[in-house]
Image: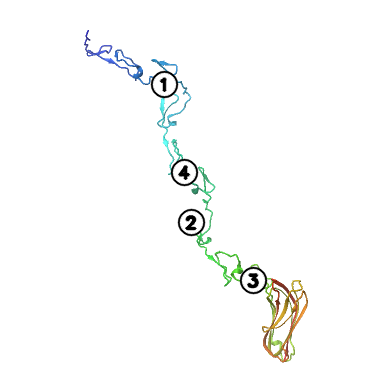
Amino acid sequence: MSPVAISGVDKQGVYVNGVQVKQALDPANETVNKGVYDPTTLSAVDGDLAVGNIEQGVTIFGKLGTVVPMDVSDANAAVGDVKDPKTFYSVAAPRKTGTMPTVAITNANDNYPAGYHAGNVGGLDAIDLDLASANIKSGVIIFGKAGAATVQDISTADAAVTDVKDPKTFFSVTGARKTGTMPTVAITAANDDYPAGYHAGNVGGLDAIDADLAPGNIKDGVTIFGKLGTYAQTITHDVQDSDVDSAATTLSRQLDYEVTSYIAAGADGVFLTLTINCAQATVLEAAYFVNACGDGAGDNNLKLQMYIDGVAQGESANLTASGVFHLFYDTGYGSVASGNRIVYLNCHSYEASDASRAFISGGLFAAACRLV
């Protein structure tokens, strides 16, 4: 029997204008309409009908579930807590998608934004290369980077360019590198100027600059820059013209003195000088009485000498530890002396190696001028 054409749709929805209509299952809902269906399976209609989507122990249309149930009642993650666009289940069980943004730190500023940070292998110094020890104050640690010893707080440094030797450089106050202007100066033997500036100094000391800075050039008993003087003290006395007149037959001058000298080996020590000014023709006679001794040894090898007008007139025997010595000079009754006559007493050391010898003198000096 052939199908009967029927106009319109019957109550079962089987025919439309006499043509039979087939039905189809819809995975969007569970409604199954009456009618004719092509052969198929429910899992082919809805792919979610699978054992992996069904709780263990539950069978849906022949599919025995394998999913072990999980209690999510205490899960409290919100979408803002999960990285975008990852999905999760929490509390009410519907699958949710995270909204947490992916953010990053940049070297433009020190902002530290909230969100997911991917991080890196190099660390913060890979983001900002200036995060280095050489850029951090000494004694400070920033994110594990200890400040270098060369990075110092210079806020209290007060050196000026004139305080630093030219051309050395330094940092002070403002931080800009500066160059010193302090001049290099030196002491010279020409004068006693002591200029301001940098003095390089020397190993030899001041006597290497001026060789005259020596004990033999410094007054006995005086110390100049560490050099103890050994130059014998000189006693000078002048016989004045007024001391000689037509009525006088002799003139005498007596001097009491005490001098300590240190005579170097082979050297002289002039310790007494007398200038006699004769206004008229005279005969000059001089005598010396001296107590002298050395450093206690009996062989000091020191001798007392007398000079008149720079000419040696004679010398004593070796001076022993103590004793009295008399030097006498007579120009002779026929000799005439007028004008200035310089008489001085000298001590000479005949020692070959001893550095110095003590000489202590004291007593009487007598000079006589006899009128012709």
Quarter assignment of residue 341: bottom right
Residue topped by disc 2 = 177
Tell which tag, 3 or 2, sits nearer the viewer: 3
Which is more N-terminal, label 4 or label 2? 4
What's the CA distance linking mark 2 and mark 1? 74 Å
Q: Nearer the viewer, mark 4 or mark 1?
A: 1
* Residue bearing the label numbered 3: 214
Q: Earlier in the sequence, mark 2 or mark 1?
A: 1
Q: Secondary structure at mark 2?
A: strand
Report the residue at 78% width, 78% height from top.
324
Q: Amino acid at mark 3?
A: Ala
Q: Compared to 325, does 131 lie above or below?
A: above
Residue at 71% of width from left, 82% of height from top?
Answer: 306
- Colour convention: rainbow
Horizontal side, residue 362 vs residue 119: left or right: right
Left or right: residue 349 versus residue 198 is right
Residue 86 shows which numbered tag?
none
Residue at the extreme front of the image, as rendered: 352
**Is the residue 352 above or below the residue 116 in the image?**
below
Q: CA distance from mark 3 to mark 1?
A: 113 Å
Cα–Cα span, label 3 and label 2:
46 Å
Tag shown at residue 52: 1
The answer to which quarter of the image holds residue 92 is top left
User: Where residue 211 sits in the image (x, y, percent)?
Assistant: 61, 71
Q: Please, what is the three-letter code of the amino acid marked with disc 1?
A: Gly
Disc 1 packing (10 Å; few <14; some 14–19; many ≥20): some
Type of the residue with mark 4:
Asp
Q: Residues within 10 Å of mark 4 (few under 14, many from 20)?
A: few
